[in-house]
Image (cartoon, rainbow, N blue to C red):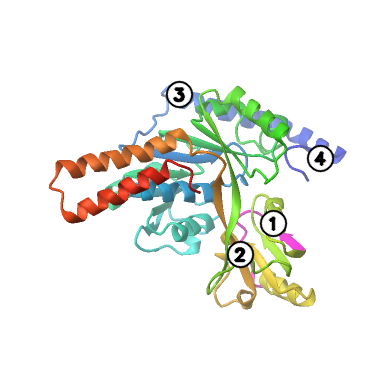
């Protein structure tokens, strides 16, 4: 079923039957937001900068690679970053779990969930905490681990914590004005919610986009996100990973492969495999955050052998859940994705980085500047000149 934009008669029927529930969902969302805006439910203002990375649809816009990219940039600017996640799909019932303290990883995949553990391994300098209460997670990050900047992963609907930058991702391939609210469609909120956004990033823009389609999407966003800066980005394969290390991005070119993924939009992963130049014999799609059984992994390995394929390819998020001892790992390759900004970084994000650099510069100048701190200032000034110019 092409969820969100029904085309067939059966799909339209299902969407129609779900419409009353969507109406109730929308009313509930409106009442909740009104309760916060009128002060009936108190929001939390943290004493440090907060960047939220989120969307208005159900998954698949690239929140995780974007959160990783922004966190790396803030760390390079001098921030001690804490990334807070709800930890969707994790097996543990722990209310709060410290996945990483910025020095080492503590939590298991069951306690952390796939995306938080992937973030912790991708940004080892960051504090990563999962929990049902992000306000409590923020308190732990600040008071126990000394965080001086927060990145909220999937935070747009988490109104409790105030933020300095609300960054919302919208997929180039979507038509949000033709979509419906959950459960009839994929929208988590109506488009009017974009009024809260400070930055809207159109993601997954192809190498040769339909310029008319892109311009129409920009106009649609501008209509609702009247206070927001609009930026553009795409996600590109950076490396190929095995359980033993990194291999060349060209390794799969011309190779027959079996693909599998447990993500919100498997068609996006299919496009990634196509861009790598491999011959995809089959692509198995599982539900988002799927936990793989031994039988499923055995079936994938057998399918590879009987199809005369040379490898089984998946996402980093999926690979992280495959046990190290499983036979499939002998043939398993994951695609590491990175953000390619199509134009300058959003101004508000650049200003946040510049503010930290200038603040640290003043602090170092006030104190006794040792040789070590002078070297550090030179490094930071060098970064300032680089980070405020596009350098994906």
The spot of residue 61 in percent (x, y) is 61, 44
Q: Are marks 4 and 3 in contact (CB under 8 Å)?
A: no
Question: Regarding mark 4 in the picture, which secondary structure is present there?
Answer: helix
State how far apart marks 3 and 2 are (Cα): 48 Å
Residue count near mark 2 (Cα–Cα under 10 Å), binned few <14, some 14–19, many ≥20: some
Q: Which residue is mark 4?
A: 11
Q: Which residue is mark 3?
A: 37
Q: Which badge, 4 or 1, comes first in the chain's sequence?
A: 4
Looking at the rendered image, the disc whose residue lies closer to the viewer, 4 or 2, is 2
Q: Is residue 34 left or right of residue 268?
A: left
Looking at the rendered image, the disc whose residue lies closer to the viewer, 4 or 1, is 1
Q: Which residue is mark 2?
A: 249
The spot of residue 157 in percent (x, y) is 52, 36
- The stretch of residues the image draws in magenta is 281-294
Residue count near mark 1 (Cα–Cα under 10 Å), binned few <14, some 14–19, many ≥20: few
The spot of residue 197 in percent (x, y) is 51, 30
Mark number, residue 275: 1
The magenta stretch spans residue 167: no
Q: Which badge, 4 or 3, comes first in the chain's sequence?
A: 4
Question: Regarding mark 1 in the picture, which secondary structure is present there?
Answer: helix
Q: Which badge, 3 or 2, comes first in the chain's sequence?
A: 3
Residue count near mark 4 (Cα–Cα under 10 Å), binned few <14, some 14–19, many ≥20: some
Q: Which badge, 1 or 2, comes first in the chain's sequence?
A: 2
**Total tally of numbered discs in the picture:** 4
Q: Are marks 1 and 3 in contact (CB under 8 Å)?
A: no
State how far apart marks 4 and 3 are (Cα): 36 Å
Q: Which badge, 1 or 3, comes first in the chain's sequence?
A: 3
Confirm whether residue 136 shows in the render. Answer: no
Looking at the rendered image, the disc whose residue lies closer to the viewer, 1 or 3, is 1
The spot of residue 106 in percent (x, y) is 39, 63
Q: Are marks 1 and 2 in contact (CB under 8 Å)?
A: no
State how far apart marks 4 and 1 are (Cα): 31 Å
């Amino acid at each position: 079923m092409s969820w969100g934009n029904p085309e067939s008669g059966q799909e339209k029927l299902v969407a129609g039957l779900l419409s009353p529930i969507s109406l109730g969902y929308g009313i509930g969302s409106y009442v909740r937001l009104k309760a916060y805006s009128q002060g009936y439910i108190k929001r939390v203002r943290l004493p440090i900068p907060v960047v939220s990375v989120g969307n208005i649809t159900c998954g698949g816009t690239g929140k995780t690679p974007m959160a990783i990219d922004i966190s790396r940039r803030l760390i390079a600017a001098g921030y001690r970053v804490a990334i807070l996640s709800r930890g969707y799909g994790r097996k543990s019932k722990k209310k709060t779990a410290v996945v990483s303290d910025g020095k080492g990883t503590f939590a298991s995949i069951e306690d952390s969930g796939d995306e938080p553990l992937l973030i912790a391994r991708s940004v080892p300098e960051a504090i990563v905490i999962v929990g049902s209460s992000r306000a409590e997670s923020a308190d732990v990050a600040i008071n126990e681990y000394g965080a001086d900047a927060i990145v909220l992963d999937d935070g747009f609907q988490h109104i409790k914590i105030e933020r300095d930058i609300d960054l919302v991702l919208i997929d180039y391939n979507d038509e949000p004005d033709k979509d419906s609210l959950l459960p009839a469609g994929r929208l988590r909120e109506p488009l009017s919610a974009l009024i809260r956004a400070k930055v809207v990033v159109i993601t997954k823009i192809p190498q040769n986009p339909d310029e008319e389609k892109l311009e129409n999407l920009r106009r649609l966003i501008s209509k609702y996100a009247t206070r927001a800066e609009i930026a553009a980005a795409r996600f590109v394969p950076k490396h190929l990973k095995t359980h033993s290390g990194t291999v060349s991005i060209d390794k799969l070119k011309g190779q027959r492969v079996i693909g599998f993924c447990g993500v919100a939009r498997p068609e996006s992963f299919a496009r990634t495999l196509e861009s790598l130049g491999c011959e995809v014999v089959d692509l198995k799609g599982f539900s988002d955050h799927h936990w793989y059984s031994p039988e499923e992994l055995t079936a994938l390995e057998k399918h590879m052998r009987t199809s005369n394929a040379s490898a089984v390819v998946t996402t980093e998020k999926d690979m992280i859940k495959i046990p190290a001892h499983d036979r499939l790992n002998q043939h398993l390759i994951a695609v590491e994705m990175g953000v390619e900004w199509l134009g300058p970084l959003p101004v508000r994000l650049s200003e946040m980085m510049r503010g930290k650099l200038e603040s640290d510069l003043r602090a170092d100048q006030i104190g006794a500047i040792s040789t070590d701190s002078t070297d550090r200032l030179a490094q930071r000034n060098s970064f300032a000149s680089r980070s405020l110019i596009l350098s994906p």
